Image: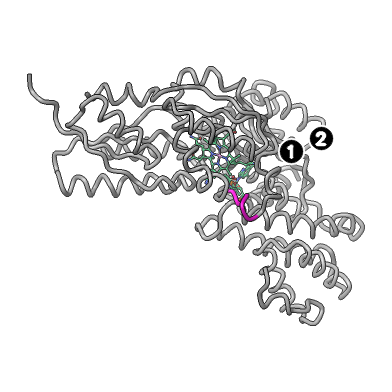
Amino acid sequence: MADEDDDIILSELDDEELVQQMHDDLYDGLKDEIEEAVGILLERGWTPYEVLTQALVSGMTIVGNDFRDGILFVPEVLLAANAMKAGMSILKPLLAETGAPRMGKMVIGTVKGDIHDIGKNLVAMMMEGAGFEIVDLGINNPVETYLEAIEREGADILGMSALLTTTMPYMKVVIDTMKEQGLRDKYIVLVGGAPLNEEFGRAIGADAYCRDAAVAVETAKSLIARRHNQTV
Amino acid sequence: MTAPAPLRLLACGALAREVLALIAANGWSHMALRCLPADLHLRPERIPAAVARAVAEIRAETPAAQIFVLYADCGTGGQLQRTCAELGVEMLDGPHCYAFFDGNAAFADRAEGEFDAFYLTDFLTRHFDAFVWRAMGLDRHPELRDMMFGHYRRLIYLAQTEDPALDRQAEAAAQRLGLAYERRFTGYGDLAAALAAKG
Ligand code: B12
């Protein structure tokens, strides 16, 4: 990919230009450049949390929006996610040390019968970027796995993903089982996946349906805040 | 005997060949086919509006036209069904074409055991490069293979026709994806039955 970007020397850019360049590099899935730029911002005294939110999360939000609008397709989203992941793995150990805000804990997984996990992984990453602790159950999760995990982990949020019309009804099985076992009100339940919509989320008794990862972060934050207000 | 009333078929482009084959084989001369681009398959949220537009166009040309929408849900999460109901047109049953070629009931029965399978149809076998390999970026970024197909174990070619050349192509596709290969002859499955009901 020889273009004029090759000539840009990241360390010579000022902060604002560098963040802009990181947004572009994330968009283009350039992992090495992202790693380098994360290092530069840290050296300049940015906190890990600032690098994460202002450079990585905001850049990934642009990618998410352009996917929604049909400008980017799945492989580009995956490459961008890989680049962001590389940056995050530098920041992660530092975040804990520097007292970045802790938002809560989310258990997330794709429902039984479904192997689609790109969207779920993206949500997990963006939630992590926003300060949530994530327990990722992977794909093909039966109700027992979800319930065992939220209890074991003392989670605040259960997130379920489905991309198939045939697997989305399984979310209701999970929520109904939570109700039967008296667990439903202990947790915030978020659901997502391309074939779902708000009406479906309501019908199955989820707290919210989220159309994309950015909305998931905002929704999770506001539902957690609402809960705190109720319990205090 | 009166001739059956004209029927306009509005189909996913991925079904064109199969629908035309069924029309020819059964002499259903009262059926006329119109297709929407097959690549809507990768952007299912756009299918309901595209169908609604095409139905409006057909009705503008032929106000009394009987229209049959040859799409399954295709990942619209029930939205296409709602759109068709509002428009007063029928559509196919089932979640997607893999299911209705296999037979929706049989597909549902097998689903659990075939959880780790990636399906090809005749269409997807012919257009594997455009609709899978390139669409998923594997031509430009082979390193995405594991993120895309890492959880899959086998590729099942659901064959609509007996065609050794396609069989070989499907097997080659499996090999490129690093998946075990199986072939199952389905014929036209529930698509044939749904059209025959209008014959
Ligand atoms: C990529 C893809 C694949 C990849 C999956 C790779 C992977 N590792 O996940 C491959 C090619 C392997 C694949 C396989 C299959 N697929 Co597929 N696939 C898609 C495609 C094109 C994009 C999905 C995607 O990754 N989007 C990108 C991400 C970023 O978006 P997203 O998943 O929607 O996630 C966002 C939001 O929904 C939300 N979100 C998602 N999850 C969650 C969870 C929570 C808690 C929250 C809050 C938010 C949230 O946030 C995410 C980020 O912004 C869709 C079509 C489409 N455009 O949706 C078909 C699609 C989903 N697949 C489909 C089908 C049929 C299949 C197969 C059966 C096909 C086959 N030939 O065998 C198999 C499935 C096997 C199985 N058992 O699961 C159909 C489903 C039809 C239906 N009626 O349900 C679709 C709609 C395509 C179609 N029209 O036919 N697929």
* Ligand 1 falls in quadrant: top right
Residue under the image location 48 percent in, 18 percent down: B106
- SS at mark 2 in the image: helix
Name the chain letter of the residue that bears numbered label 2: A
Q: Residue at x 42, y 49 (%)?
A: B46
**Residue under numbered circle 1:** A107
Q: From the image, tell me which residue sits under label 2.
A: A153
Q: Label 1's element? A: strand
C-alpha distance separating marks 2 and 1 = 8 Å
> In the rendered structure, which amino acid carries the disc numbered 1?
Val
Q: Is residue A67 visible?
A: yes
In the image, what residue type sits under mark 2?
A: Glu
Mark with earlier residue (2, 1): 1
Residue B190 position, x and y percent, is 38, 23
Q: Which image quarter: residue A54? A: bottom right
Residue B100 in sight in this render? no
Name the spot of residue A224 as percent of width and height, x first.
Answer: 70, 47
B141, A29: nearer the viewer:
B141
- Percent across and percent down for residue A69 are 50, 58
Please state the extent of the stretch shown in magenta in the rendering: B136-140
Left or right of B171, for residue B8: left
The N terminus of chain B sits in image quarter: top left
With A219 as the anchor, is B170 left or right in this view? left
Q: Is residue A37 left or right of residue B44?
A: right
User: Mark 2, residues whose alpha carbon is within 10 Å: few (<14), some, or many (≥20)?
Assistant: some
* Magenta segment main secondary structure: loop
Please tell me whether residue B194 is drawn above or below residue B144 in the rendered image: above
Q: Position of residue A118 (x, y in %)?
A: 65, 45
Residue A137 lies in what quarter of the image?
Answer: top right
Q: Where A113 falls versus B110 (above or below)?
A: below
* Chain at tag 1: A
